[in-house]
Amino acid sequence: MQTHAVCAMPKMHKTTKHCGSSLQRPKRWLPMPRLSIRRRLGQLPPKLLRLHSWKLLRPFAKAGLSPTSRVSKAMYSRAPTRLLSRLWGLLNEVCLPRWLRLPLLSIYVWAFSVNMSEAKEEDLNRYQNLGELFRRPLKAAARPIASHQVVSPCDGHILHSGRSRGSQIEQVKGLTYSLENFLGPQDWREPSNSNLPFLQQLGVRPASRLYHHVIYLAPGDYHRFHSPTDWSIHHRRHFPGTLLSVSPHVARWIPSLFCQNERVVLSGQWQFGFFSLTAVGAINVGSIRIYGDQELRTNQPRHVKGKYHDVSYTDLYGVGGLTLAKGDPLGEFNFGSTIVLIFEGPRHFHFQVKNGGRIHVGEALGTL
């Protein structure tokens, strides 16, 4: 195990309908549609939504605090999001009295359009706290795994899919970030190759291409993530960092957002070469958990910017590392966050998903 942090990492251990009535309800009853909060707010009269056009923020704009100003970005970046996230994580684990579970959890289910019919346990009274609801397992048949070589590791919205441009990949359309900043130096592979171009450090062959796929998990989504392919994980790198929101709106606003946030990078190999999955933390994400890595601790009170912790899975699991089959459970988030896949593939690989679209665990990402 190699660590690049102020405190050393401890040695790891191996793990592993309602009955409908024939009478029509009176029109005075309010409907309860399965919509997200954003769409619910969109149903309000336009006069109540003038904030969207920033009319109510004109005094702040005159003072230089427009939503895109450097001052606004600096203020947001310095907000105590890590403290708030730890407090939120503690709150999520508070055991609710049984009489409060159904009314409180029902509000969350309604507000974020959670599909409880897919959950292995549909009865909200069986969830002791909000954290258990976030991390709920699904029924075995709820997420069939496609026969394609690479599938979606999680539920969510697709922020971006495509090819890398050299060692740059897109965060959202128009904003790119450096692979070297995101993954960190590859000194754990061959220290002597540290002066090579970054793609060569990753072992990407000239005849191949590097692809990336970014999925945003909203608060109402299924928060567990699975293995996207048959692969072996050789290395884990944990970057402590900020915990800014990773919603699409913020991702369009803050450059290199994913390089700033706390994240766990899993790197290894699949049949076509280099493959990595990165779980990116966000505000109110109390933890990132990797099932085969019980010593991983995220969202700690203190961290040093630019430092990271390395763990070799080949030392832990043997020469082959941690071997996973497509669809195997891999880890989980609290609340919502982002998964970034970066992988080497043949030139004839084509994504069959659209940016901005919805995707679920096990659905095909592309064709070979």
Image: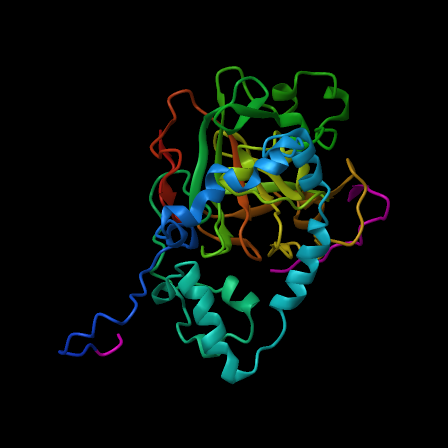
Residue 10 lies in the magenta stretch: yes
Q: Is residue 102 left or right of residue 246?
A: left
Q: Is residue 361 at all visible to an observer of this figure?
A: no
Residue displayed at 44% across by 31% down:
161
Which of the 4 image quadrants contains residue 300? Answer: bottom right
Q: Which residues are magenta?
A: 1-19
* Image quadrant in which the C terminus is located: top left
Residue 114 versus residue 318: which sits nearer the camera? 114
Residue 46 versus residue 291 in the image, above or below = above
Residue 173 lies in the magenta stretch: no
Residue displayed at 35% across by 56% down:
35
Residue 22 versus residue 244 in the image, above or below = below
Report x, y in % for residue 67.
Answer: 58, 35
Q: Is residue 221 left or right of residue 145?
A: right
Residue 340 versus residue 190: which sits nearer the camera? 340
* Image quadrant in which the N terminus is located: top right
